[in-house]
Image (cartoon, grey):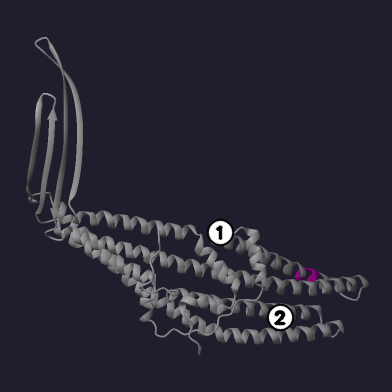
Amino acid sequence: GSQDVALAHWWDQFSDPTLVRLIEAALADNPSLDKALASIASARASLASVNAGFAPSLDGGASVTRARQQQSGTTSTLTTRSAGFDASWELDLFGKVRRNAEAAQANVQARVDDWHDARVSLAAEVADTYVQYRACLLLVDAYAQELASMEKTAQATEVSVKAGFTSRADGSLARASLASTQSSLQAQRVQRDLLVKSLVALTGLDEARLLAQLGDGGKALPQPTAFRVAALPADVLRQRPDVASLERTLAAASAAIGAAQADLYPSLSLSGSITISASSLASRATTWSFGPALSIPLFDGGRRRAAVASAEADYQSALAAWRQGVRDAVKEVEQALVSLDGVAYRSERAALAAREYRAYLEATEVRWRAGSVSLLTLEEARRSALSSQIESLTLQRDQVQYWIALYKAVGGGWTANATEPKT
């Protein structure tokens, strides 16, 4: 195409306000997006917990105890009060806390990317379902128009059979063709209703409101304007949130190896406490303590080494997932482009075939009424015309669906510096 369309405004190029409204409704209220947001909140909480390891911990406590003592016939009541603070701080000598923080931060970024990916997938699913619904309406109209014509043919044939001018076989053929088209029409109506139910589930709109919006959009398929991707497939890897999420998961796995390795070395912590106590029988006393503590791993049966091996295996798994994700991204983009290229040619030829078969049907029907061709010839022409019309409509639908697939394949307007959602 000759016009560049920003991915962020992808849906505007379809010039279909109904489609845009349905996508906005889905993005505003959808359980899958709420689940993704909850995952972000959980990852942020984990990050805050890990970051707390950089700072000392301080605990305070206080108590009051009242006791009765009896000694040498004398009873006395003793009240003891105490208050104190305990502080500890583990020094991050070998980077265990730092590496855990890196892993937690990467996990937060991965969950944010997952949220963006969920939004892209949801928008594409809504658009795809909407396009199927519009195509279904066109197919219902095509079958209904053909059915009206076939009913007239069946009635005329029935009269001719009763008058003895037409064989009973032609009457059976007319009734069979009519019943087959009625069945196909009903199947399309059922499919239309099923697609409405899917849109209700995706958008969260009640069915009456959804049908009102669908009615405002007419029956025509949305048609995108020209679109061009600047460079493929390398640039697309920076435009897909799912690939970015896999990369951040890989970074988290790498940081987890460093944290496991740091656990093999000694840990040094500083701790101290201050306690003030007093009782009704003694004066106030203050005690305090402070000093370092060194913990050296001597023997644990190989537990720490196994943890390192497990972290390394997780990294290899994440690396394989990232590599596969990159390959899938390139494949999906290239497949979408190939499909678009192929369907464009097929759609043009199918539209031409539909027009020519329709012209042939109209001419055959005139000849049938004049008695120069048989009913079988007419019904064969009708089936060819209807089949070519359905194929043309199906290819038009497929062409729009391939545009939607390309939108999803190139990341749906997401960028690496996209704004993080508020949770």
Find residue 385 and name its label.
2
Kind of element beneath mark 1: loop
Q: Residue at x 57, y 68 (%)?
A: 21
Is residue 86 inside the magenta stretch? no
What's the mark number on residue 204?
1
Q: Quadrant of residue 229?
A: bottom left
Magenta residues span 172-177
Q: Residues within 10 Å of mark 2 (few under 14, many from 20)?
A: many
| Position of 12 relative to 100 (above/below) | below
Q: Secondary structure at mark 2?
A: helix
Residue drawn at (83%, 82%) of the image: 368
Quadrant the C terminus occupies: bottom left
Residue type, mark 2 in image: Ala
The picture places residue 259, in percent across and down from the top left corner, at 18, 59
Residue type marked 1: Gly
Dot 1 alpha-carbon crowd within 10 angstroms: few under 14, some 14 to 19, many 20 or more = some
Residue 98: mark in rendering: none
